[in-house]
Image: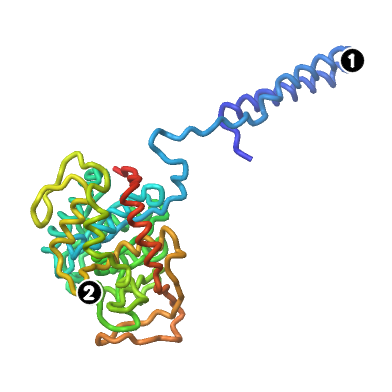
């Protein structure tokens, strides 16, 4: 039952007060006035007490442009090395075009080897936001340029590399049940845990990375110490595996350049302000930029194809049936080898065996029929 509002409560109190007063008078004069006064006071009370009843609920009006299922959306901070390869940009577009599914609280960048330092990753993330007409509508912040061990070595919580992005992650997760989808190295996440260990209790990390149980993988190798720090913490942690060359990892969720050239032209919203791509050229929608990214990437396969690794980490949040998940005691990486810890009470989730057809069908469907996420600033 809903609470009465203040106006109703006041009216209710007045009515009740009057009723009690009336009863008192009624008792004192019962012998004299009898039935006439009784009937009068009863009718008066009945006329006043209905004001105590809860008023029928007025229909809740949804502000223009706000979807009715806003509360059901997955609140996400996306932590990306946006300028590495081409899957981060496609993941970003997929996320930004899934406005019915995701509520994007912000985007933070981290810097892996390929991508021109933190500024290069920031610039590329900004290009995708601009193509989506969301630049300045979604917070975009720089995280750490360096690695966890060097930053944490003489850590000053009020002045450290990555503070802008990491502090944003810490503050934003205090407000709501926001999760972090991390698709680069885990430096920013480890720094957030170091600065505020209670961070572990208010969010979860979905990380695209590792060839677990095999060694190696780009995101992992960029900062293994940060990964171990996260594995040894209590923060809920889901690992969306890469597994180079294996059918069970996101490496298998690849698209060919031929397919991109035929399906992507012109897709996505028309950008109000076109971008200059990282390889040059001017682009007015994400679809055309996608073709440019595929044109300038190295290929190791015949026919030429590239996995959309990072996009899969978002797809399995959208529909968990597009991958298989299992819980394992958290292992640790020592000397580039995974060491199992079967006695470890701390468990993590491992994602594998992705439904490539369904994930890619949804990717193209999303590109063809985008629903932009709402602005958050
Ligand atoms: Ca990435």
- Judged by depth in the image, the label closer to the viewer, 1 or 2, is 2
State left or right for residue 97 relative to residue 271: right
Determine which residue is flagged by label 2: 218
Give the mark, 1 or 2, whose residue is nearer the N terminus.
1
Tell me residue 214's x, y (percent): 31, 84
Residues 151 and 303: in front is: 303
Q: Position of residue 210 (x, y in %)?
A: 30, 76
Name the residue nearer the viewer: 349 or 43: 349
Residue sitting at 24 percent across and 72 percent down? 219
Q: Residue 232 at x, y = what percent?
A: 35, 77
In space, the residues marked 1 and 2 are separated at their CA atoms by 91 Å
Q: Ligand 1: does it lie within 8 Å of the C-beta at label 1?
A: no
Vertical comparison of 253 with 61: above or below: below
Mark 1 is surrounded, within 10 Å at the Cα level, by few (under 14), some (14 to 19) or many (20 or more) other residues, namely few
Q: Is residue 156 above or below residue 226?
A: above
| Quadrant assignment for the N terminus | top right
């Amino acid at each position: 039952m809903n609470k009465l509002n203040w106006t109703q409560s006041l009216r209710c109190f007045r009515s009740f007060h009057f009723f009690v007063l009336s009863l008192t008078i009624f008792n004192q004069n019962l012998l004299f006035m009898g039935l006439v006064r009784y009937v009068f006071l009863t009718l008066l009370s009945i006329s006043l007490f209905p004001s105590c009843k809860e008023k029928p609920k007025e229909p809740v009006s949804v502000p223009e442009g706000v979807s009715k299922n806003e509360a059901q959306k997955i609140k996400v901070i996306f932590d990306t090395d946006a300028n590495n390869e081409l899957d981060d940009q496609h993941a970003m577009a997929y996320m930004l075009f899934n406005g019915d599914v995701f509520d994007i609280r912000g985007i933070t960048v981290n810097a892996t080897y390929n991508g021109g330092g933190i500024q290069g990753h920031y610039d590329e993330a900004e290009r995708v936001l601009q193509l989506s007409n969301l630049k300045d509508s979604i917070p975009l912040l720089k995280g750490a340029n360096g690695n966890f061990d060097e930053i944490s070595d003489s850590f000053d919580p009020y002045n450290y590399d990555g503070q802008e992005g990491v502090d944003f992650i810490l503050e934003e997760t205090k407000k709501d049940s926001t999760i972090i989808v991390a698709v680069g190295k885990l430096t920013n996440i480890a720094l957030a845990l170091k600065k505020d260990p209670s961070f572990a209790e208010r969010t979860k990390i979905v990380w695209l990375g590792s060839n677990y149980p095999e060694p190696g993988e780009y995101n992992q190798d960029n900062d293994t110490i940060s990964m171990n720090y996260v594995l040894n913490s209590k923060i809920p942690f889901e690992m969306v595996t890469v597994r180079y060359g294996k059918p069970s990892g996101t490496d298998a969720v690849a698209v060919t350049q031929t397919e991109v050239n035929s399906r992507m032209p012109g897709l996505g919203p028309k950008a109000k302000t076109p971008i200059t791509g990282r390889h040059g050229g001017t682009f007015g929608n994400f679809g055309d930029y996608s073709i440019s990214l595929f044109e300038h990437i190295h290929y190791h396969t015949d026919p030429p194809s590239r996995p959309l690794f990072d996009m899969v980490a978002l797809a399995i949040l959208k529909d968990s049936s597009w991958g298989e998940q299992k819980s394992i005691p958290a292992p640790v990486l020592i000397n580039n080898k995974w060491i199992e810890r079967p006695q470890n009470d701390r468990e993590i989730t491992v994602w594998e065996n992705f439904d490539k057809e369904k994930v890619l069908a949804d990717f193209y469907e999303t590109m063809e029929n985008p629903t932009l996420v709402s602005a958050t600033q």
